[in-house]
Amino acid sequence: MSWLIDSSIGRKFIQSISGLFLILFLLFHMTMNLVLIFSYDTYNFLANEMLGANWWAIVGTGVLALGFVIHIIYAIILTLQNQKARGHDQYEVSSKTDTTWSSQNMFVLGLFILLFLILHLYQMWYQMQFKELFMIDGARHDSAQLVEEVFSRLWVVVIYIVAFIALWFHLNHGFWSALHSVGWNNIIWMKRLKVLGYIISTIISLGFITVVVAVYLGYSNILG
């Protein structure tokens, strides 16, 4: 199994699998966030009772964190590896290759998303699960109210929307690229996967943006 670490193909495989795993999480997270629009009580139950400082939530958080770390580390390794392989000809090669803007800027998009993630974790996860887990004063048990407070500030809303647009570009290329790396790379499948990647990235990003805008404009908690 050393080829997974030592070879370029193995590194791309690990990067792809970790990326697909994170896409599944984003689908779950986005779906859960949409609940906030309809019912604060249901959202609080999901966020506090099911995903609070319970052992399964802690294990899940650990697995998720590991997935992010692996994805980031291998993104850095592959980026440095590609730059080294291209050398002084990297700009000439890129100009002759039919590539999209997102494919050429995946690392930059990922770095921006990482910086946004740090802000998001501090505003949400740190205030809830982390403080509760380590018994720090001020742990929030009113998740819906916390979300409403965070998205009451326009500058936060703008940052989140920009981040979700960046996420759209990152996912749009990353989805089909990941499946290409794991073996789904014939011409017929690639066309379908690119369309599917566009649909999935749009659903995820638009879902997140919808929640942010709805909460900011006061259109959430329809069912009470």
Image (tube, grey):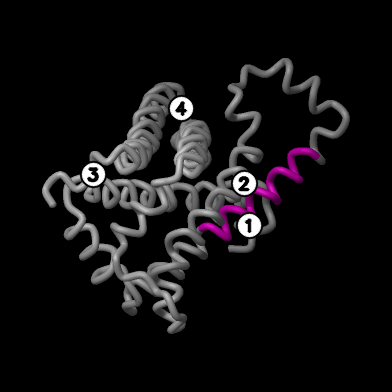
Q: CA distance from mark 3 to mark 2?
A: 46 Å
Secondary element type, mark 3: loop
Image disc number at residue 3: 1
Q: Are marks 3 and 4 in contact (CB under 8 Å)?
A: no
User: In this image, 49 relative to 91: left or right?
Assistant: left
Secondary element type, mark 1: helix
User: In this image, 1 relative to 138: left or right?
Assistant: right
Q: Residues within 10 Å of mark 4 (few under 14, many from 20)?
A: few
Indicate whether residue 113 is drawn in magenta. no
User: In this image, 215 relative to 221: left or right?
Assistant: right
Q: Residues within 10 Å of mark 3 (few under 14, many from 20)?
A: many
The residue that mark 3 highlights is 220
Res 183 visible: no
Q: Amino acid at mark 3?
A: Ser
What residue sits 53% from the left and 35% below the top?
Answer: 166
The residue that mark 4 highlights is 186
Secondary element type, mark 4: loop
Q: CA distance from mark 3 to mark 4?
A: 44 Å
Mark 4 or 1, nearer chain start: 1
Q: Amino acid at mark 2?
A: Ile
- Residue 47 location (% of width, % of height): 29, 64
Q: Amino acid at mark 1?
A: Trp
Q: Amino acid at mark 4?
A: Asn
